[in-house]
Amino acid sequence: MSRLTRVASGPYAPPVPARELTAVSADGARLHVEVHGAVDDATAPAVVLAHGWTCSTAFWAAQIRDLAADHRVIVYDQRGHGRSAASPVCSTDGLADDLEAVLAATLAPGEKAVLAGHSMGGMTLMAAATRAGFREHAAAVLLCSTGSSRLVAESLVVPMRAGRPRTWLTKKILGSRAPLGPVTPLARRILKYGTMGPGSAPEMVEACARIVHACPRRVRYSWSKVLDLLDLDHAVRELAVPTAVVVGTADRLTPAVHARALVAALPRCVGVTELPGIGHMTPVEAPEQVTARIRELVSTYAVIKEGA
């Protein structure tokens, strides 16, 4: 099965980038990076998008298509995902290293951007909060459908009362080594139940299923272990830039309890948006709302490069 399986047409088909490059992380990991939109316009504000576990740059297709009209949009594949090579290093420090490498490769020294992260992408931004490269380039942050700790214990994927049995079973499901196989009607139903709201349109489910099923099994398993042990509570308190939070009320993977904990801990929270009936895949399920939140952060906090 091709790792680049994706829908070929419609709003969730990935746009063609204006530029592609490779960023090299601190440990030598090579990351596929795309730049979309106004690449030669010095007045165009920059937006950097970090996708989540088992996803790829294709996950942000709707945001790229909208924002590229008047922004420079930078997206990259997390290590082992999409077109980025797998690495033996799977850790939150690795995620932070990778983000710093992408920022250094695509932004001018001192240039500010709005950074948005979904799920593990949001965890990437938290993990990088104290890094010099992050602080040099981050104007504001959007955290979508994410959490900083207790991901397995708080998950609602297994419809049982909270406690050790539910946590054990959730860990087994999310950390499964089983191949996902082709995208079948059953596979779409399972993915929709676990990651999307009940009202998700078929084309949304199809787009997400193709992206998730394209993630290599070993990569999915390796990163599941990192998420199981995740503890970035300390990093949230160091995220000193203006930060907004988005969560779907039907999110089973990172339910709203995580968003509320982030809001309480963030030094400069600038608002939380709870989207009724939306699941974990907020950028795909509610593209207009997520894009609007990014635009608000850009208009309020982005700084145009000097000399523009």
Image (cartoon, helix red, strand yellow):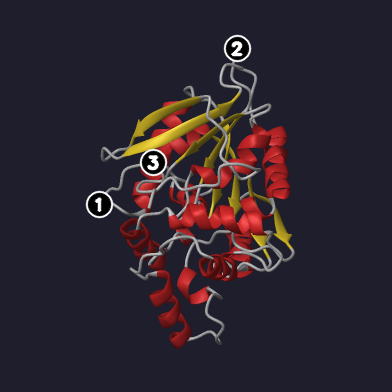
Q: In 3D space, how far apart are the residues under numbered discs 3 and 1 (Cα atoms)?
A: 16 Å
Q: Is residue 290 visible?
A: yes
From the image, tell me which residue sits under label 1: 88
In the image, is 194 to the left or to the right of 10? left
Could you tell which of marks 2 and 1 lies nearer the N-terminus?
1
Residue 37 in picture, x, y percent from top left = 60, 26
User: What secondary structure is marked by label 1?
Assistant: loop
- Rendered location of residue 137, percent (x, y): 51, 32
Asked if 274 appears above or below 126 in the picture, the reply is below
Residue tagged 3: 83
Q: Residue 267 at what x, y percent from top left?
A: 60, 52
Residue under label 2: 307
Q: Residue at x 61, y 45 (%)?
A: 12
Tell me which corner region of the image, top left, top right, bottom left or bottom right, holds residue 303.
top right
In the image shown, does 216 or 260 lie closer to the viewer? 216
Which residue type carries mark 1?
A: Pro
Q: Is residue 48 above or below residue 201?
A: above
Q: Earlier in the sequence, mark 2 or mark 3?
A: 3
- Helix, strand or loop for disc 3: loop
Residue located 50% across and 54% down the image:
210
213 lies above or below 82: below
